[in-house]
Amino acid sequence: MHIVKYVAFESDVSLARLLIETTKNVGKAVPGFLGEVHAEAFTSSTEVAIRADIVLICHSLYGQANKLAIIQSAARFVAKDGLLVVFHRWEQAGTLANISDALRSNGTLHELRRINVKFNASHLTNLEGRSTTEKYMKQKLPPLHSENQIVQRSIGLLAIEPQNCCLTMQIPPQVGWVAKMKTSKPFGVLSPMTIVGIQSCVRHASFCGAPLSVIGGGHSGHCIRDGTLSLDLRPGWSTVFVDPEARLVHAGGGATLGQIAKAAQCHGLVVPLGDRPGVGMGSVLSGGLGYLARRFGLSCDNITRVVYISPDGKLSIAETDEDLWCFRGAGSNFGVVVEITLRAFPLVVMATQDSFYALGINRDCIRANLIEYARVSYNLPIEASLDAFIYHANDEGMVLATSLFDTSDTEEFRCGQLAGLQQPVLSNSQMIHQLNPSAHTPVQLFDRELYMTPAFDPKRFAESPPSKLRSFKRCILLPTFHDGDGDIAKILADAVHCSMPNKWCYIHILHVGKASSLVVPAFTAFGNRSCEYAVVITGLWPEDSKEMKVKTESWVENIADCLVSVYGCGVYGADLGPGDHDTLLATHAFGSNLPKLVDLKNRLDPLRIFTSTCPLQLAPLLAPQGVVILICGRRFAGKDWVASVIERVLNTTLTSGGTRIAQIASISDSVKSHYAKEVGLDFVSFHDRAVKELHRKELTIFYEMCKASDPAFDRRCYVDLVQQGTKSGGILIVTGVRDGLDYVHELAGGRAVVTVHVQASREAKCHRGWVFDSNIDDSKSEEAAECACEGFFDHTFHNNDSSGDESALSKWVIEELAPTVLRSCVRQLKGYPTPGAIFKDILSITQQRFGIGLSSSLLAWGLHLDQFDIILAPEAGGWIFASPLAERFQKPLLLARRIGRLPGGVISSDYSGSNIAFLKQGQIQARHILELTAGCIQPCQRVLIVDDCLASGRTLLALFKLVTSQGAPPTTIQLLPLEEYERSILRTHRNELDRFPISVGIDDVNVVGETTNSRDDWETIEHPAAEVIRIFKDGEDGDVKGEGGEEDYHSPNGGKKKNGKGERQRRRKKITPITARELARALSGGKRPKSDEEDGNLRRGETIDGDDVDDGGRYMRVPKFWDPAPYGMIADERERRGSGGGDIVPDDAPRQPRDGVRRYLGEYGTRLMTPDEARSIGSRIPGGSGGDGDYLETIFVAIASYRDWQCSRTVESIFSRASHPERIRVGVVDQIRIGIDDPCSRPPHGTCESHPEQAACVRTSQIDYLTVDASLSVGPVFARHLGHRMYRGEYFAMQSDAHVEFVMGWDDEIIEQWKSARNEMAILTAYVSGTEDHINVETGERLSKSRPIMCMSDFEGGGDGTRHLRHGQQPEGVPYIHDMPTIEPFWAAGFSFGRGHFVVNVPYDQHLPWIFQGEEISIGLRGFSYGYDYYTPERQACYHYYGRTGVPLFWENNDIYRGSGTYGMNRLNAIIHMTVTPSTKWIRTDELKYGIGKVRDVQKFFDVFGIHVKEQRVEGNLCRFVGRPMQAQFIPHLRSNGMGIDYDTITFRYVDNKRDDALGRG
Ligand SMILES: Cc1cc2nc3c(=O)[nH]c(=O)nc-3n(C[C@H](O)[C@H](O)[C@H](O)COP(=O)(O)OP(=O)(O)OC[C@H]3O[C@@H](n4cnc5c(N)ncnc54)[C@H](O)[C@@H]3O)c2cc1C
């Protein structure tokens, strides 16, 4: 900084005199220097005549009010780029700290520094003087006569930059960035105009932990990202200065290639640069590929000097090859480049010529043409390069366009003649046309680049002009492929011929090689030097098509992956940024230079400020280097004790041979070491308690000062600590991290981090001496110490035992923490061996120095010497991990070997392999054979099988078979405790689980009963009424009779009116008993007997005992419940482990039930699902902003329809009114008289030919119709049961009636409402209001805000055990509660919307024939007992057509089935514990499947909501409580992880206090 104007204020006269002297001396030495020193304090009324470069204020703030205002006033007199410097006493949490916080927040703080001043007080003998000094210094002086009179004092220096760029936030105007700005939320976009300004920004970024990027030309797409602080250098930093003599070009960090080329050209010079004028410094710093690279090397090869601001905010210059090394290829990772100097070459004119060839119509032809191109280009001299473009031209199909650049710059060129140019011709290719050769200057060339010119067939854009195209490109460096070896040309041919997602995409082959490949790879960071071509795969898509975006990006990525993994010599790093896929690609961007670069990055940018660029990480390739266990928690939680026990267990119980594998370090150690350095002490001396105590206060002040002047100080301490502590590659237990935890993973420098949260109850803390202090306990740092973000902590340890008993903690360390530590050491490779896969290299555990020891200790844990006689292990992991066990237990070790490696007689077992080698070759199911020497296992020997982990379990099974084939007794199995098994199974199958839509496969045969559907996911079930007959036949007909005279709960007219739609008449009627004959006839398709030939409808079954009728109709083929295999695999494995890991059950062993998904999801409600389990359910599809990020959650809608002409209209409205119809799948159970009724599948508005836009025509793959003969209908419960069978893993599951009208945008709206409940277990459910007055049925517009709430219920029915709870008419009104649904006690069948796991966990019961009333309390209670909560939506999704007349109802079958209803109702009530004297007459089949869960006791439900089962009565007026009071009482009990209301903490019991009052008034 050049200082010429200087103004100082010093209120201490003697000091002012000194200052005046010094200033005069400076004035003499510096010509033009203007200095003013005022011997007075600066106040808010002071005026200064000049604008100074430095304004200095000393001792002015003492005693003045509002010091910040004074500083701001002084700032007015600072010139542009100048500094205001303030000296003031430093106090802990005092003035300067507060002021600096304020200045930091407006971005003007340049620096805050503490200066320790020592002075001798021995000259202060006068008592009055001493006391004034003490007052002034705010500290006591040593006693007058004491020997040591040295006093230390802290002064703060505050440097402020009032004209700081941070005040001038701006949004860059150019198109690309504006688009980026629209979609990203950068931390800020700033245009610093001075070096100091840039330095401030760099520091600011480190303060805030925000990544910093520079907007160069804006072409990478990474310079503006979410949360990034972006510096726009264009406004002040794009000047280009050319030194023609030295042939050097000096360009500002914001200059573009166009500006550099133009400036150089004015002096007859050229710089090898990229081909687009708008591209910026990002390209030069990352390589710089262009048509001149072949002759003059890459741009980065020609960098001779870089002026930059380093990550620590210092201005630095790199001039030597060593210093320039990282800027030549990876520069954007190491600082903000403000100026760069590039070598230039004399060259004025280039000659070019473009030619166009037909690429061919098939893959082989395309491939041949590409090889021809490679042959011709490869043979060109250094002066010429031949670029190629492969694109789709409308008229000519795929075209190969070549562009020759001749830089030989002969005399003829300058005269405008092009005689020297020899256009190389692809003689074996069919030329379409060729342009004349022409001469261009470098700047002109920018305008003519082939694909930007009309020659590049503008028609292909005109074909269907998209509003705006977005692009995504990746560039792979490739060797020559002219000899057709390997098959680069084949991959490219495939890419353009088979998989190109649209006609706008293209591939550009830049011809480089020669000079650019002559540089020694180690000489610059750009390490991939053996390439001849840079192949840029460019995907384009219309801006508004998300679907096309996903498709196109994955096209680009797939080709890049394919090329790089098979043939590539590298990836061009300039386009890469943060993100999983790029991180993996980036490991190929620097060749063998990567380790050196990562090391440099760790040292020079430890806080990882420059991360919005090509990632520098070894992590994807290497196993972590050491492990950090981070212990966090509030004070008195017992963190130190927990840390010490962890250390002890790891170093004793879990190690062999007494090796220490773990050590504890506290962040305060790092602070101490910084402090020791500053005060010149040896850090080791701090181990002495006395020294520590002596410095305690100073240390605290030091820390606060450091934090005030460098808010990233704690992060630096953390980086120091982990770098020091894990040097030996052990486990470092870090305590004392307080101010924020968000950085601990990122800054661990390639170490694995395991996070532990120590929690303690209030009582436990009090017992340890904790007293609440709001200043401390509510402080930011105390809160930050336990960072609330979900999923942050790997483990939580509840440290509530105050007795100091270590046993529970030790057990937890061994069983929970240590396995996590081991797991964290497994190196993971994303996208390997196939895209989307994650490769976990278990054997990388051995790369930790503690890996084998810890593994074998964990394997040995719980094993006893007398449990087994020999150990058996398969190669390779098993061998490694079993060996130490054999040694430890002194047992023989048998090694199972692959086929053909053992001599003599062998026993063998084969299995299908799934390992990496096979996956890579695409042979997923290849067979392996494991062998053992015959006779090595004796029948009496007990075998311990040891392997590393369980992937598919096939190896283990093969070993198991080997052992059992020898007649050996049950085997013990030990695996490394890598619980990842479950997640990896689900992850591996994610594509399968996310598949949508999945049809249940009845579209071809659409009449249940007429199907012989043999699909695996269909099964045969017994019709529920037939089941009643079969089971109760022995009890004679009387048992299956309905009992006339009772209140008819299953009467068609027994239903009370819903929502005021008319009280249904009650009717008593003698119920005719059902007979087997009648049933059989009904099941056979009506009242006519069936002949064998006609018996297609229903499968023939056994005869009904004792009856002489043909019972061909007892069975039905129906879809199986959704139950994907991965859940079953996990459930099986859990069972196996649950049984002590002792026995493995072979695959073919019968196990009941096989219901894998429900065993996985909390074991049929035995326990509450975990959030992970719940989350694992639900498919999503790529889509718009209506869903979760770029994905849309899918919705399954189940509809049970009985001869309903409105069914098809309902289906139509589901799709046509949805915002995202593509996310919906409908399953209709269509009960019709076949041949008489219109099926629901018939489009409502005419045929598909006349009205093809109808959902029934367009969305056929998203609708399944399960057509059932109406004569089989036994009521809605069974129909809805069939509906639940049609669910296929959708994210949400919904049910509605078949005659409803949906509102516009219902899908987004109902999802939003569901999400606003923040409850994974929320089910939005309510009776549906009528269409009248509520919806415009033509437009789908909602007309009313009112909605019902489910709170009214009472007992009804006979006293014989069939009395049941029935929800009556529900109150309806405008909701009081907004922005979230209102909680309610009851579930409604008319509308229910929740997560897919609801219908998996609580499916409709298959065995409830003839139930109409009572189904709701049954599902409601079952759901409650599984942990579900019911809410009424604030806005209804659909409205119901009530009051319909002449519509057939299932009561038509009354005479046939009604008798079975008694048994249905008995079962219903018995299962939900709602009968006083349960009947023995109920079907007990599948009690577990359709029973109640154990998460909540149903008695709790009865207690809370005032239901008296014994007395068969309910408390009245519950609706007065449901609504605001219930919301206020219950919502606070929602579990913090969103897994439902915790009823264990609810003591509320509803009692009708108004009862008497009501009765009195009644
Ligand atoms: C249409 C198009 C054509 C292209 N043509 C070529 C080509 O012919 N040859 C070629 O080699 N590449 C080419 N590229 C790729 C290009 O080199 C990279 O995208 C490069 O990263 C763009 O640099 P930029 O400065 O324009 O981008 P930006 O997005 O502004 O910056 C890219 C990265 O560089 C960093 N950066 C920028 N300026 C500075 C600075 N002064 N100091 C420190 N870091 C800085 C940024 O922080 C960011 O991380 C092209 C890309 C596109 C989109």
Image (tube, rainbow, N blue to C red):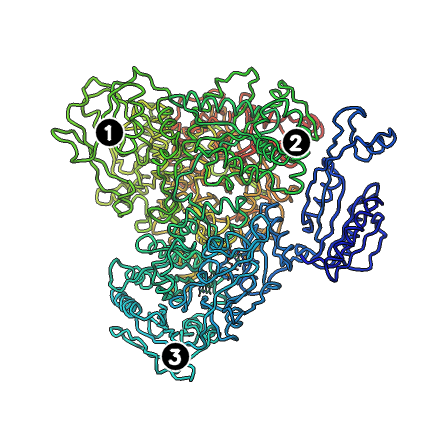
Residue ID for mark 1: 959
Question: Within 10 angstroms of label 3, few (less than 14), some, or many (20 or more) residues?
Answer: some
Residue drawn where x is 31% and y is 55% of the image: 567
Q: Which of marks 2 and 3 is in front?
A: 3
Is 70 on the left-hand or right-hand side of 1208? Answer: right
Residue 410 image label = 3
Q: Which amino acid does label 3 sit on?
A: Thr
| Quadrant of the image occupied by residue 1291 | top left
Residue ID for mark 2: 699
Residue drawn where x is 32% and y is 42% of the image: 1086
Q: Say if 581 sits above or below 760 in the image.
A: below
Number of dots carrying numbers:
3
Residue drawn where x is 41% and y is 33% of the image: 823
Residue 813 visible in the current orientation: yes
Farthest-out residue, left: 904
| Residue 1137 at x, y percent in the picture | 36, 26
Question: Within 10 angstroms of label 1, few (less than 14), some, or many (20 or more) residues?
Answer: many
Q: Which amino acid does label 1 sit on?
A: Leu
